[in-house]
Amino acid sequence: MAEITASLVKELREKSGVGMMDCKRALQENNGELDAAMDWLRTKGLAKAAKKADRAAAEGLVAGMVSQDAKSGVVVELNAETDFVSKNATFQEAAREIARVALGVDGDVDAISAAKTAKGETVGDMITNLIATVGENMRLRRSARLSVGQGAVALYLHNKEADDVGKLAVLVALEGAGDQAVLKEVGRKIALHVAGTPTPPLALTTDELDPALVAKEREIQTLTAMESGKPREIAEKMVEGRIRKWQEEVVLLKQPFVMNPDQTIEQLVAATAKETGQPLAVKGFVRFALGEGVEKKTDDFAAEVAQLSGQS
């Protein structure tokens, strides 16, 4: 068998755009012959998949699952290029399978991609094969996992396409020794709140707000007050009240509960603790909305025509 050198693997990778391990395998399967290895990759659909990797993938699905004992839960986002793919049963099952795998992985996207599915292939390979089959670029964009020692993790999926998959997923973890059935139901209600409140929460508590975000809001409010004619030192004092009001709007525990606006989430948790007779706390929450933060490519033909006209 011909020696598979690092330079040969690198050359095939540059030619095909496929990952190093797949290139090495292709060369091993074809006795180190570059052209034959390239043909092998094309036969497997891997080269085709790699060519799609630079195309924008901002559609797809968010998948979520909770363990049988409700002590842990995960949400993952699997992206594709078009919304049409999210209705594909094969794509939906892939998203579900990734969530199943993620339940048993204490790690990030890379760790999940390297973990094996029930069929024995890695999640990364499953996605690569799906790209070749469906014909669109795809990627496992992000994942999150919450767990509790005692208590319950609850999941809410909004705009569901099928079981365990939708366009928005929320996980809420409640830590406490109270009746788990009660905690699961309250956790589900809080998750529904996080999904449906007009101002999605940015943090669980005031202390957990990003300092840079607070500083930016403080500066905005200060400049707004100064534009009304107030000196900066007076404006800064006025701002403190506005910052407190803003924090109440963006901190989960301070927000009015959507199902009972006269009660904050913090008060709901306290009432549940009283009902169960055990201390209770929200340990954390995760909110994944499909495609948030991803720049979507749009074709502005009018702008292109105007640009061309200006160049003529």
Image (tube, helix red, strand yellow):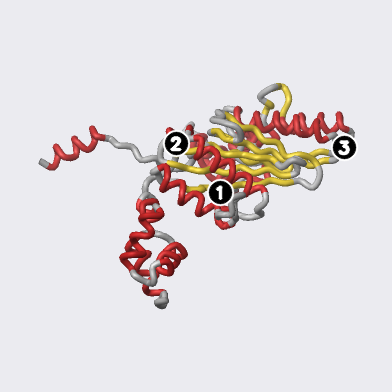
Residue beneath label 3, please?
278
Q: Is residue 170 left or right of residue 29?
A: right
What separation in Å lies between label 3 and label 1 (alpha carbons)? 36 Å
In this view, the mark in front (3 or 1): 3
Q: Which residue shows up at 41% across the image and 64% down it?
A: 26
Q: Residues within 10 Å of mark 1 (few under 14, many from 20)?
A: few
For residue 85, which numbered disc appears in the image?
2
Q: Earlier in the sequence, mark 3 or mark 2?
A: 2
In this view, the residue in front, 78 or 300, is 78
**Mark 3, residues whose alpha carbon is within 10 Å: few (<14), some, or many (≥20)?**
few
Q: Is residue 309 left or right of residue 241?
A: left
| Mark 3–mark 2 CB contact (< 8 Å) | no
Q: Are marks 1 and 2 in contact (CB under 8 Å)?
A: no
Of residue 264 and residue 86, the one placed in the foreground of this image is 86
Where's the C terminus, which quadrant? top left
Please state, as top left, top right, bottom left or bottom right, where the N terminus lies in the image.
bottom left
Mark earlier in primary sequence (3, 1): 1
Residue 131: image location, x then y, percent:
43, 47
Residue 282 visible in the picture: no
Residue type at the position of mark 2 = Val
In space, the residues marked 1 and 2 are separated at their CA atoms by 37 Å
Residue lying at 64% horizontally and 44% vertically, measured from the top left = 74
Q: Secondary structure at mark 2?
A: helix
Tell me the residue that label 1 is attached to: 212
Three-letter amino acid code at the position of disc 3: Gln
Name the image quarter holding residue 176.
Answer: top right
Residue 282 or residue 142, whichever sits in front: 142
